[in-house]
Structures are given as C-alpha cells and as structure tokens.
Amino acid sequence: MKANRILIAEDDKAIAEAVMLNFRYAGYEYMHFDDGQSAAEYLKNDHAFDIALLDIMLPGMDGFELLPYLEKYNIPVIYMTANTDSDWEVRGLRGGAEDYIVKPFEIVTLMVRIEKVLERYGRLNTVYRFEDIVLDASDRIVTKAGEEIELTPLEFDVLHILVKNKNRTVSRDRILDEVWGVDYFGDLRTVDVRIANIRKKLGLSEAIRTISKTGYRLEERRK
Amino acid sequence: MKLWQKISLICSLVLLMVMAICILGLSYHARSKILGVSISQAKGEFEQLESSFRYECYSHVSKEDSPSVQNSLLKYCFSKFASDNAQLYVDTQLVYGDELPSLNSYLPFEKVPHSRDELGLYTDKERIVLGCTVTFPEYGDTACRIYLTQDISSLNDEIVSMQLQFGFFGLVCSFLGLAVIYILVRRSMAGLNVLEKAAETIAYGDYSSRAIIGTDDELATVAQSFNKMAEAVEHHVAELEDSAYRQKMFSAAVSHEFKTPLTSILLNADNLKNTYMSEDEQFEALESIEQETRWLEMLTAKLLKLITVNSELEKKTLSIDELLSKVEKSVENKLDKSGCTLVKHNAAESIHGDMDLLQSALVNLVDNAIKASQPGQDIILGAEDGMLYVKDFGRGISGEALNRVTEPFFMEDKSRSKKSGGVGLGLALVHEIAEAHNAKLEIDSEVGKGCTAKIIFAGNKTVISR
C-alpha cells in the first residue's frame, strides 16, 4: 500500500510548514499551495490525492470555491479556518466537506481527524514501516526483517499508536485511553510494562524514548 | 371594546332615546289633537241639537200646558232633532233616549251647568259625554237636561294603531340610522386601523412601513407625525445596524488577524514540545515563533492607535511647513532604502488639527506610496487650500480594490503586503484620523499610472492658505 497523499492549501506559510513537518514524519506525502487558483490548476493534471486540507480564506479562489474541483476527483476535504462563525461551518459541511477545524488547533486533533476521514473513505494506509519493522494494522501482524514477531493484543495496540505517531510524543494517558478505553481507570504503569515488552521483543530499547513526565516517542535514527 | 364600537354604541343609544321621546311626544300630541277634533265635533252637534230644541220648544210649548203635556211636547220637540245617542231628562226623569245607568256618574245632574257656553264635558277612553241644562223660565221652573254621548272607542283603536305605526316607523328609522352611524364611524376610524397596522409592522421589525391616510382630518395629522417618527426610527436603526455590522466585521477581522499568527505560534510550540526534530527544524520553528510574535506586537500597537484616535485628538493651529518636514524626517530611512524621492509642494500656510495624528496619517500615506513605487520615482507630498495630499506614480490600485482599501485588514495583495511589513490597517487609520478632523479621505488611482490620496477638510477655516 502506498503512502497517503495530502493536498494542502493554506496561504500562511508558517502554519503550512508547521503542519507539513508533521505530515513528513507521519509518513504522508503532500503538496502545498498558497492560493486556491494554483491548486485548482494543478488538479487538472494530477489528482491522485487521498484527502485535501483547505484554508477557507485563500487569495484568488477561496476554500468554498475550490471544493467542487476536489469533489470532481472524489477527494474528501477538511476545512481549516480562523472563523468561528457557525454559519461558515454549516456552509462548509453542507457544501460537502468531511470536517471543519477551527484555528488555532492542535496537531494531534488535526492528525486524528485526517486519519478518521481516510478511514471512512477506506483509504487509510494500514501498513506502517519503521526501519526494518512492518506493522500491518488490518491483519494485526508485525514483522521485523521479514520475520513475524509474536505480540499480545495490548502490546500490538500500543506499538500501533507509537508507529502511527512516529517522531511525536504520545502521552501515557492517550495510550491508556486509546488502547484500554476511556472507562479504564488503571495504573499508568501498566503502559510502562507493555512498552518494556515491546522494547525487548523488537529491539527498540533506544528507538522508543521515554519522555519524562509525559510518555513515549518512537524516534527514527538520524543519518 | 374598540373605539369605533364605543362611539357607534353611544350614538345609537342617543339616537334611540331621541327617537323614543319624539314618537311618544308625537303620538301624545296627535292623540290630543284627534280627541279635541272629536270633542269640538260633538260640541257642534250638541249645540245644534240644543239650539234647535230650544227654538222648537219656544214655538210649541206654552205656559198653559199641564206638566205632562209639557213633557210630551218637550219629548216631541227633542225627538225631532235627537239621534240615538242623545238623552233628554226633565228634572231627573228620562223622557227620551236609552237609559244609561252610568250617566249620572259621568256627569251628575246637579253638576250639569246651565249656561250654553260652558257645557258639561266628560271624556274617557270609550266616550265623550256632553251635557247641559236648559231652562224655560217662561214655562215655570222645569229644567231639561240634554245629554249627548259620543262613542270614541273606535277612535282610540285608531290612535293605538297609529301609535304602533309610529313606533314601527321609528324603529325602522332608528335601525337605518344605526346602520348609517355604524358605517360612518367605522369609515372615519379606518385611519386608526391603518395606523395600528403600520405600528404593528414596525414593531415586528419592518421599519420601512408607513401609515397612508387619504383624508385631511386629525387622524391624517397623527399619521403624518407617526410617519415622521417611523422615519426617524428607521434612520436610527439603520445607523445602528450599520455601525453594529461594521463593528462585527471589524471584530471578525481582528480575530482572524490574531488567530493566524497565534495558530502558527501554537503549532510550532507544539512541534518543539512533542515532535522529534532536527536542529535546523527546531531553529526554524523558533524563528517562526519569534517572527509571528513580533508581528502580533506590531498589530497590537497599530490597533491600539486606531482605537484611540478620537481620545488622543488635540487640535491646534499648526504650521504646514513644520508638519511636512516632520513627515519627511520620519520616512527618510524608508525613502533611502526604496530609492524614491520625496517632493514637497506646499501652497498653504497653516492648519488646525492634531500634529501627531496628521503626521501619522501622512506617514502612512507616504509609506503606501513607497510600497507602490519603483526605485527612482518621485512621491509628492503636498498641501493646498483645504487639503493635504500624497501622490505617487507607482503601481496604482484597481477599481474594485479602491472601494475597500479603507476597510481594516484589507490588503490588495496579502503576500506582498506582508513581506513589506503591512498589517492592513494603514488606510483604516488614515480614514479614522481624517474623520476625527471632520475631513474626508479620497483616493484616486489608475492602474499603472499611480495614485493620489487626499485628506480634504470640511470648511476653509481648517487650512489657511498663504
């Protein structure tokens, strides 16, 4: 399965770059446009995008006007805007957008929403790679250098989160919430136990870094 | 109960009362008139009977006749003229006519007068009874009493039926009158309905509604005043709505302008905290945070200036030469960098205004002129009778953008403006400063040929020419 490809149209360079940095690390491919017109032009020749992230107030052609160009190629759209006016949100969603995210937002929120939309469209890449480790989320198989490694379901889920958020800190709370469920009021150390097992079984003792007071981060080794 | 209903009801009651009184009075009057006619008819008949009888008696009865003969003669004389309803009594004895037992109670014998001129008269609903005593002194002391009874019961029936007719007629007239009153009152009150409807429409928020009344009575005057009021309300509401709309647009623009740099600051901080980044990437994120923070600081300062224009205003008479020199000095650096030349054209002496604010306005205009100009081009900073102006020969502004340039945060080309350090508040600020001086900001421009921004003062006293 190929990496997911994202179209991003945002005129503020600083915002676009901060977002794209995370796309890069999460293993997404992306194309950035800083006005609506050029995005629309580009789509005529290349429209192999899995999802689009559009600012509404774009110069040239705004996000609302750009939507039909993306619908034509069945590319789901997430709007992001500084406008909190609910009229806009309704207009955006009614117009056919999949989601609407208000600035300022958090990276985690954006990433989760992108993932959910991709999942809904059955486009989410469920095969994650980290060095020589391959995690197939749909078959629930983990291999290292081609050999299958036995993980308990909980260990698999914890690793899944870490791989999905490659290079980003994932808090223990979030792991607990996503793997054990929000109703589980267990000891945070139960996470640490699984992490220790994963480190041992996959030889990731260095790559999974403990971030003090927060959680864990799966870091790619720099060349 | 509605006013027109009240008025109609009161008018109707009054009408009915007047009608009833009239009918009663009329019928009473008619009754007595008819009765009077009957009485005088009866009297005439009676008098004729009496005088004929008296005359006859003189010619037939003599003194020598015995009382019984006299009686017979009297009876004879009477019968010649009397009808069925007449009676003749000699003393108290009935000699002619039917015995009427109640006659004595109507007109007792002793009360029947002797004179022809004052007849005894009795009336009730059924009858008129006339009576008089005739004496013949020549024949002795025999007293003849003549009675005439007129049955008027049929007359009474007629009067009753006449009264009923009057009543019926009166009722019909009253109902017609009521209908007319109803229609007239309703029509003259129709204006009130128009007013009410107009007021209601206005109350529901349609301030353009007016009351139109075609008549020229008091209601029309009220309607006129009402319309004047509605107009004033409409005007004020429109003003309020407009100012609220502008306020809303302004806050939306402010919030957008703040949220964009805030978003990138937060995203970069988030990345620095949670993402495993290379040193270069970390540096870039920090640099971005720094830039955006500076941007926010500048935005805040400009906004504050824009908001406080009116409270800062301190008007004095200023020398225009001094004002223009100050402006030139504060744009010196930017002029040097851009390679443009500032040319001053001063044709005025002094101006009444706030030095700092006017300077700030002109600096903003020159700033814009520099941004629009190519290196080597001239920028004219001038003063004339009634206005200050800045003229450049640069890029110019398109017609569509020209209408919006004074809107806060409007930028014709956002990416270019941001690179040259504009926040999109310059012209909005100039506009505010001009308004605080009772002046207008006018911008003329042609794409490719340049742009002239003028601050035109109302009244010639503000700027005094040489």
Image: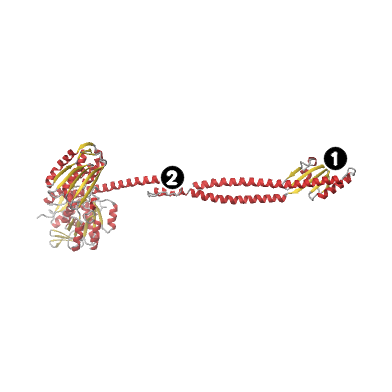
Residue A46 shows in this picture: yes
In the rendered image, the quadrant that contains the C terminus of chain B is: top left
Q: Position of residue B170 (x, y in %)?
A: 61, 50
Mark 1 or mark 2: name the one nearer the start of the chain. 1
| Residue B404 rendering spot, x and y as whole percentages | 24, 50
**Which residue carries the number 1 mark?**
B137
Task: Decide if residue B421 is in sight here.
Answer: no
Residue in front for this viewpoint, A198 or B368: B368
Horizontally, is A147 left or right of B307 in the view?
A: left
Badge 2 marks a residue whose secondary structure is helix
* Total number of numbered discs in the rendering: 2
Q: Chain of mark 2?
A: B
Which residue is more in the foreground, A57 or A135? Answer: A57
Tell me: residue A82, above or below residue B359.
Answer: below
Circle 2: residue type: Val
Label 1 secondary element: helix
